[in-house]
Amino acid sequence: MSATLGALPPAQTVAPSRDDARRLRIRSWGLAFGFWTLLALSFAVRMVLSGIAEHEAMSWQRAFAWNFPSFYLWMALTPLVGWLGRCTAARGWPRFFAIHVPASLIVAFAQTTLMLLIYWPLRSIVAEPVSFGALLQTEFIYSFHLALLTYWLMLVVLRGMESQRRLKDERLRAARLETQLVQAQLQALRTQLQPHFLFNTLNAISALALADPAQAKLMIARLSDFLRLTLEEHHSPQVPLSRELQVLECYLGIQRVRFQDRLTTRFDIPDEASRAAVPNLILQPLVENALRHGLLAKPSGGALHISARREGDSLLLRVDDDGLGLHDHTSEGIGLGNTRARLRVRFGEAATLALTRRPEGGTRAEVRIPFEEFVS
């Protein structure tokens, strides 16, 4: 009995194409350019407003000429700071300070010097002309101090972003591993159930081979149809209930050959329920259990009633038989045990499987799973 969810191919990490990688780099640099531009603009506005508040007028040209070169230089230095941060990740505090203390001094000195060299040709245009020595004396110490703070702030932010990315990747890998584990569990159940169903069916065929060869031939043909349908859904974790009923009808065709005129079936499936997504071959073991333990030993035969309905956020699947009913010593076989395991693996505590005695005689099997409309 192929009564378990089809295994999906293992989750794989697909390397991005060259065009995708280029688009990603362009997008990243675009976001970085927008961030540093907004930061430079905000500092320029702050400088102008501070000058007005202190009655020391500062032109917008001077504020832009001072801030934009500075922050664009930091934008260019961001990959270097990020690389230095990755070099010291998880290497211990001694290595961290041994690299970043001198690196912060060198990077801050280089950024400050380059910024002043860029600003020097513009100063005669946007501010009162002064000598380069006076510019160094008035601006270098403040700018160098600010550059040191900027380096360490960038380092903290970049390491935080890297840690967040790694955490996201770890969660994604954990989710993929969990998915692969579930697939392995379902595949193990599948390999256990297939021999079980085939053994039962082939045993029935062998019993008919001599007594009724025509019926044995008919059962072989219907077994072929059933296996074809189940193999078509091999890689489908879920199918619409309408498809599940189609496979179930094929299975019942095999059983009608065994029961002759002693088996009648009735389906009660509204349209809304027929569109629900259900685990592949979830009803077949319930029907098999009803036939084997409820109707097979009943001399007069019996009837099966298969129904489904939506109840709020749940889908209720029910298989009723009017057979001999449950006994106190009745234990679950392979089919029901594996069905319960499948539901637990697929839905956890959100799914239930219950067997009860019917007041009018026979057994009722009920499966309750979360309702979800099938999307192809």
Image (tube, rainbow, N blue to C red):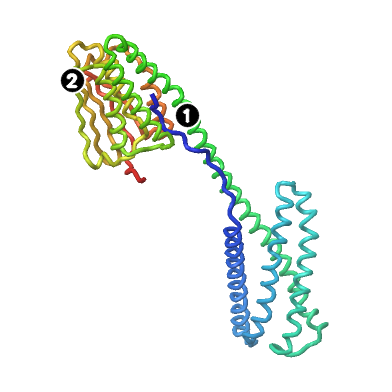
Circles 1 and 2 in contact, beta carbons < 8 Å: no
- Determine the secondary structure under disc 1: helix
Local crowd size for mark 1, using a 10 Å CA cut-off: few (<14), some (14–19), many (≥20): some
Residue type of the residue flagged with mark 1? Gln
Q: Earlier in the sequence, mark 1 or mark 2?
A: 1
Residue 23, percent across and down?
58, 62
Is residue 25 shown above or below 229? Answer: below
Residue 42, percent across and down?
59, 75
On the image, numbered disc 2 is attached to which residue? 359
Is residue 234 shown above or below 200? Answer: below
Residue 88, percent across and down?
74, 51
Q: Which mark is residue 187?
A: 1
Image-based side of 285 in relation to 58, left or right: left
Image-based side of 91 in relation to 50, left or right: right
Q: Which quadrant, please, contains the C terminus? A: top left
Residue type of the residue flagged with mark 2? Pro
Residue drawn at x 37%, y 30% as measured from the top left: 228
Residue drawn at x 28%, y 42% as measured from the top left: 275
**Viewer-side residue, 332 vs 4:** 4
Residue drawn at x 37%, y 34% as measured from the top left: 279
Q: Which quadrant, please, contains the N terminus? A: top left
Residue 199, percent across and down?
39, 16
